[in-house]
Amino acid sequence: MTDELDPILDAALHEYSNVEPRTGLEQRVLRRMQAHPRRSWWLVPVVATVMLIVVIGTRRADVATLSLRPPPMPSAPVIVIAKPVAHAKPRGLPRLDRFPQPEPLTPGELAFVRFVQARPDQVREALYMPDQIDIEPIKIAELPSRRKMRNLTKFIGTGIACAVLATPSFAQTEPQTKPVTVVSKAAEAARYFRLDFTVKELENGKVVNTRAFSTTMQSATNVYGASIRAGDKVPVSSGDNKITYLDVGVNIDCRDLKIVDNQLALQINADISNPVESSGSQPIIRQYRWAGIAFVPLRKPVTVFVSDAVSNKRQMQLELTATPLP
């Protein structure tokens, strides 16, 4: 509204300040002077006063116009609000209710189940192992020339000692022994690391199931190491109304942790087993076993073991991430 009134006020004040005297003012003044010659002495200041008033009024109008004009308003800054970009969240690895995922039996496994059901006695006898096995101690007979070798060793040692003592350099100089510094393992700085294991089950190159396990290990003393146990006990009938429980699941043992060139070197033993769905009364256990030394860089996941299944296209992987603790 103010922007529309400003031009109207400026135009009105401009017209008011530009008022000119009526035409014929000079002729009327001259005629009046001719008609009244005696009074001409005072006409000059009157005319000068009138002209001065006109000039002052014009200047005041200009000043009023400038004072009424509002100062220019600064332009408001343009604020651009950026829309938040929706980043796609990384999809986590699948985690099913059961690990590893159950699979149907292969033709070979089905044939083995039928054989066990048809001839259980022969299978029991073939797989039977006694609780205690008597092993006779091993006896090693003494070698006949052992006494001769002992006497020959004493003779050679005596001769070498006599030759060394007879040398003049050895007789004149006293033996000088250098101090030996022995650093015990307890004197080394102990460092602690968190070991994060991830067991992955893949099919045709895609991860279909995962499980995560963690433990802590020390680098200075490696007497006890670290162990992970997670699983279930599966009941198995062993005959004569007896039931035996088999341990299935994930077993991981770590020991001999050392730091080599900013990497961790450790011995890992892993055992992963799971029962497979079977049409018979006895379950079938699938098992993966690994044992070896792994070199793992710090703070980076590394696949330490990989095994393909024998009867299908699945694959089992064991991944390790080592993180130093403060």
Image (cartoon, helix red, strand yellow):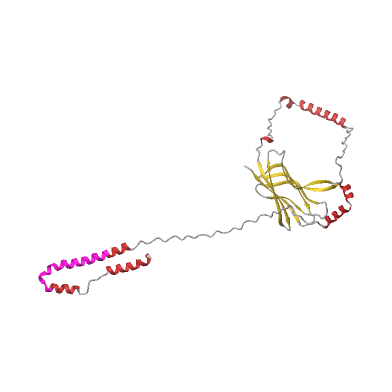
Q: Quadrant of the C terminus?
A: top right
181 to the left or right of 103: left
Give x and y (percent) for residue 19: 26, 70
Specify start and end residues of the magenta stretch as a single range. Answer: 34-60
155 relative to 302, above or below: above
140 relative to 197, above or below: above
Give x and y (percent) for residue 317: 73, 52
Magenta-drawn stretch, dominant element (helix, strand or loop): helix
Quarter of the rendering containing residue 315: bottom right
From this viewpoint, which residue is outermost toward the top? 172
In-front residue for pair 27/79: 79
169 relative to 209, above or below: above
Q: Is residue 48 located in the magenta-colored stretch of the structure? A: yes
From this viewpoint, which residue is outermost toward the left? 38
Give x and y (percent) for residue 141: 89, 34
235 to the left or right of 320: right
Quarter of the rendering containing residue 129: top right
Q: Quadrant of the N terminus?
A: bottom left
Q: For the point 29% across and 63% down, which residue is it?
A: 64
Q: Is residue 150 located in the magenta-colored stretch of the structure? A: no
Give x and y (percent) for residue 67: 31, 62
